[in-house]
């Protein structure tokens, strides 16, 4: 085993879209696990839009990534050394670690053993069977509460979470409408993920988007699964049905903004339609992860859910791979194969 | 009985704050009730911020007031003529009519008989026992769902609804914090309505308001009863507790705005705190009005709720009386005594 730990660290808080000067690639000695801890050889890191928020120092649901520390990410890897009786070298684990070759973790919370042989690819634990899949599962079913026959609007629909939300909505007997950027992504929504309709938001203002949603959902929208915010959320708010529920998962349109929060301008429509916006975090459902993962695994096995993954290779490519999320050039769940020995 | 019906009509849709040129005072012959209808001699009209929205022609929960028609308002009055077997001349009724001497109404829905002798003043049916009181009652208890010991933040707290919300919150064993404009109103909040703390929003930006709320509620806010919007809502969003509920009743800061909707900029905090914004209309609770009115009447009788009313006289004063709501010069529920013969 090497004694070198390659790390992708944060050295400056980004303003707007992150740039190379905000990060460093360094090496450190591989740490040693202390009592109860394990040393994980990270093999894959999940790259998610939410990670952009963790780089800021505004108040949020997690402390900001400290300057000089590796960029926080969900990873999967193998136990390289263990000071925990329940974990042996070679065990595969999922956890919230850093983009680095080796992380120290204390099992419990986000750190749990996974069965690499039970799935087509171990990376599934970073996509359909991990936080992404469970965000879609609990966010749609527990927060959005769709009923069969209702119309579900998904924004960021070609993204890792959104594409799963649309497929779960269809399994529930709902009509699914997706909003995404560009003709290629929209084609994937209906062709690969079974959405009933796809709307390309590019080049459209609130009025145009409002009209397109109305055309796709003339009877109104009962559930919105919101990943984006901005004019896309505003247009959704203009199309609510009575009693509609908005499951607020993310606001990717704001994460790199340097112009202050926009939020939801048309909240007046919540009054008009007795509707609600409900923020949520998948971490609130930690104790129900086994239930959600089992359901997702079954749907995958039954061919009811397709989970695309987009794997870029090499820790040296961490930044360009991360930036794909904001330029929209990934096709499927964005994953970094950390590489190395 | 006179044959002249004096009316306060809308003749032009206001842009921003309504002006005299948007309205007319005219006279029409008194109409006659047809089968099932009653003719009501309106004695008092309720003046509410929500009426401003009814003058616009944007999509809302009610059709806009037609140009040339009397301005829509809740009124109380006596049956002057009846073509309905359940209503006799002299009966007092509450309904959604117009600012005019006489209205035709069909009992059912918003139009119901009231017992003028059961209350200290018949005008109570336009304040604590009417839509205003029930908005406070159902909005706080059913939408906000406060638990004893929780902290409730009320915006527009010196208004007709807000002052009742604070008092109901105290009855529920909550800590009540009110936001209002000016030292006089803030003094009334703690002195007359039992709020634990009052915050004057005047001259303060989002950061200053955020800090003042934090000082008054260092452990965070569990329920917001929102009447105002804008920076006041933004500052509230910055002080949410885990699982907080925002009962969205109104957005008075936007009603006269000519600059487009602001909405809720800090909705990101809904994700951080797994919190929600829930729009509501008191009309959704129509079938539970008797329950709410009985509870409010009991609290008034027990001296637990104080319901101030501000009565201006004369249909000719309809506009200046209405504008008090936006300049904040009323002290208590704004009511217009229609006057005349």
Image (spheres, coloured by chain):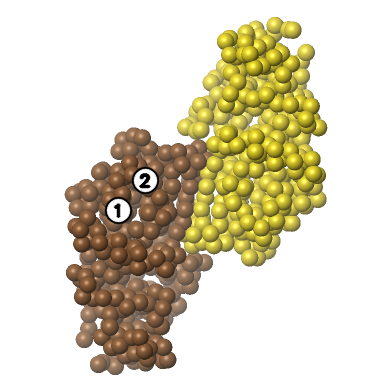
Chain colours: A yellow, B brown
Q: Determine if residue A201 is in view.
A: no
- The residue at 22%/72% (across/down) is B118
- The residue at 68%/37% (across/down) is A293
Residue indicated by mark 1: B168
Element class at badge 2: loop
Q: Are marks 2 and 1 on the same chain?
A: yes
At label 2, counting other C-alpha atoms closer than 10 Å, the crowd grade (few under 14, some 14-19, many 20 or more) is some
In the rendered view, does A295 fall on the left or right side of B230?
Answer: right
Image coords of residue A163 (percent x, y) = 71, 45
Q: Give the label on residue B147, or none.
A: 2
Pointer 2 chain: B
Element class at badge 1: helix
In the image shown, does B253 or A334 lie closer to the viewer? Answer: A334
Image coords of residue A87 (percent x, y) = 66, 16
Image coords of residue B183 (percent x, y) = 22, 48
In the image shown, does B198 or A302 lie closer to the viewer? Answer: A302
- The residue at 80%/47% (across/down) is A192
Q: Quick check: A198 above or below B289?
A: above
Q: Quick check: B38 above or below A119?
A: below
Q: Which quarter of the rendered picture does the N terminus of chain A lie within?
A: top right
Q: Which quarter of the rendered picture does the C terminus of chain A lie within?
A: top right
Image coords of residue A281 (percent x, y) = 56, 38
């Amino acid at each position: 085993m090497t004694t070198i730990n390659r790390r992708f660290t944060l050295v400056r808080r980004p303003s707007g879209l992150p740039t190379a000067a905000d990060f460093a690639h360094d090496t450190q000695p591989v740490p040693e696990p202390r009592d109860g801890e394990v040393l994980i050889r990270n093999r894959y890191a999940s790259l998610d839009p939410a990670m952009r928020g963790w780089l800021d120092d505004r108040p949020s649901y997690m402390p900001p990534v400290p300057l000089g520390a590796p960029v926080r990410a969900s990873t999967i890897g193998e136990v390289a050394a263990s000071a925990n009786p329940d974990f042996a070298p070679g065990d595969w684990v999922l956890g919230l670690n850093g983009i680095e070759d080796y992380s120290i973790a204390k099992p419990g919370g986000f750190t749990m053993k996974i069965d690499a042989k039970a799935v087509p690819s171990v990376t599934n634990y970073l996509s359909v069977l991990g936080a992404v899949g469970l965000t879609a599962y609990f966010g749609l079913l527990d927060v959005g509460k769709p009923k069969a026959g209702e119309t579900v609007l998904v924004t960021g629909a070609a993204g890792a979470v959104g594409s799963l939300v649309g497929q779960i909505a269809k399994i529930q007997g709902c009509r699914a409408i997706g909003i995404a950027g560009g003709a290629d992504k929209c084609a994937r929504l209906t062709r690969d993920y079974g959405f009933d309709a796809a709307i390309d938001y590019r080049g459209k203002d609130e009025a145009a988007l409002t009209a397109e949603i109305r055309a796709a959902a003339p009877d109104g929208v009962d559930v919105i699964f919101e990943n984006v915010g901005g004019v896309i959320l505003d247009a959704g708010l203009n199309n609510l049905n009575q009693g509609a529920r908005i499951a607020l998962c993310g606001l990717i349109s704001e994460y790199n903004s340097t112009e202050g929060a926009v939020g939801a301008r048309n909240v007046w429509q919540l009054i008009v339609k007795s509707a609600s916006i409900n923020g949520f975090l998948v971490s609130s459902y930690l104790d129900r992860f086994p239930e959600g993962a089992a359901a997702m695994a079954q749907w995958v096995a039954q061919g009811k859910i397709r989970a695309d993954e987009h794997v870029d290779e090499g820790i040296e490519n961490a930044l360009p791979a991360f930036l794909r999320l904001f330029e929209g050039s990934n096709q499927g769940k964005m994953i970094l194969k950390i590489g190395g020995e």
